[in-house]
Amino acid sequence: MARSGYGSDGGSSDQDSAVVNSLLKKLRPNDRSFDRSYSPDRPSGGAKPLSSIKSVRPVKSGAVWGCVSLGVLLGAALPGWPYDRDCGWWLLLYLSAVSLVVIAGLWGARVSWTGRIGWAHALAVTTIIWGLALTAHEVLPRVGYAKARLAWRCHDGRADAPAPFSVAVRLVEPEGAGRAR
């Protein structure tokens, strides 16, 4: 069943577009894009033809696995750090190497996401988590979160934090101190 007035002559579609334009003009009085009448010959300004869209160059799987394996190898080597990392400059150098593990993991995650290789992405995210765990292992005792307290700088060649100075007075004598022998 066809409606009367639609498709039989070109005049009714022009009338319909004029009605739609007038309704849109009432909704948006400051918009001037509806002042022009619709003409199907005119190209739309919003969409670009597919040929002008630049495609992303695919990343080869060898390059993806190379980036991810670089982070994994560095993360696997850090627990065997040959230098003292208790305090001082060696600690700073160790934390710099740990930050490189996190950066390599982020880099591998981005490349593997672009290359659409799921296992490499999972391994890169695991590398990021491993780097953050290595960071937490060294940082948390130094910021007072862990039970053992360590210092950032060396005190007498050791990383043990000096005992905090206390002015508390002992009100109760230790056991056995007040007994006579």
Image: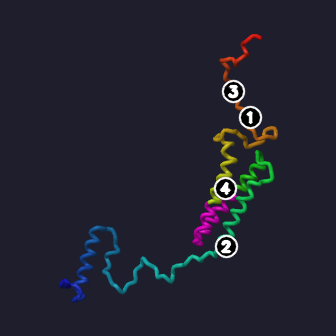
Count residues near mark 1 (Cα–Cα under 10 Å), then give few for <14, some for 14-19, many for 20+. few
Whole-number angstrom distance, CA of label 3 to CA of label 2: 58 Å
For label 2, the SS is helix
Q: Which mark is residue 63?
A: 2
Are the two marked residues, 3 and 4, in contact with CB atoms closer than 8 angstroms?
A: no
Q: Residue at x 69, y 70 (%)?
A: 66
Secondary structure under the numbered disc 3 in the rendered image: loop
Q: Which residues are magenta?
A: 99-125
Are discs 1 and 2 less than 8 Å apart at CB?
no
**Height in image: 93 above or below 114?**
above
Tag 1 residue: 162
Q: Which mark is residue 114?
A: none
Q: Amino acid at mark 1?
A: Pro
Disc 4 residue crowd, few under 14, some 14–19, many 20+, Cα 10 Å: many
Q: Which residue is mark 3?
A: 166
Q: Is 111 inside the magenta-drawn segment?
A: yes
Q: How is the image coloured?
A: rainbow
Nearest to the eye among marks 1 and 2: give it.
Answer: 2
Front in this rendered view, residue 176 or 54: 176
Q: Is residue 171 left or right of residue 37?
A: right
Label 3 and label 4: CA atoms lie apart by: 37 Å
Q: Nearer the viewer, mark 1 or mark 4?
A: 4
Please report contact status of discs 3 and 1: CB closer than 8 Å, yes or no. Answer: no
Mark 4 or mark 2, earlier in chain: 2
Answer whether residue 156 is magenta in the image.
Answer: no
Q: How far apart, in angstroms, are the residues tagged by discs 4 and 2? A: 22 Å
Q: Which residue is mark 4?
A: 131
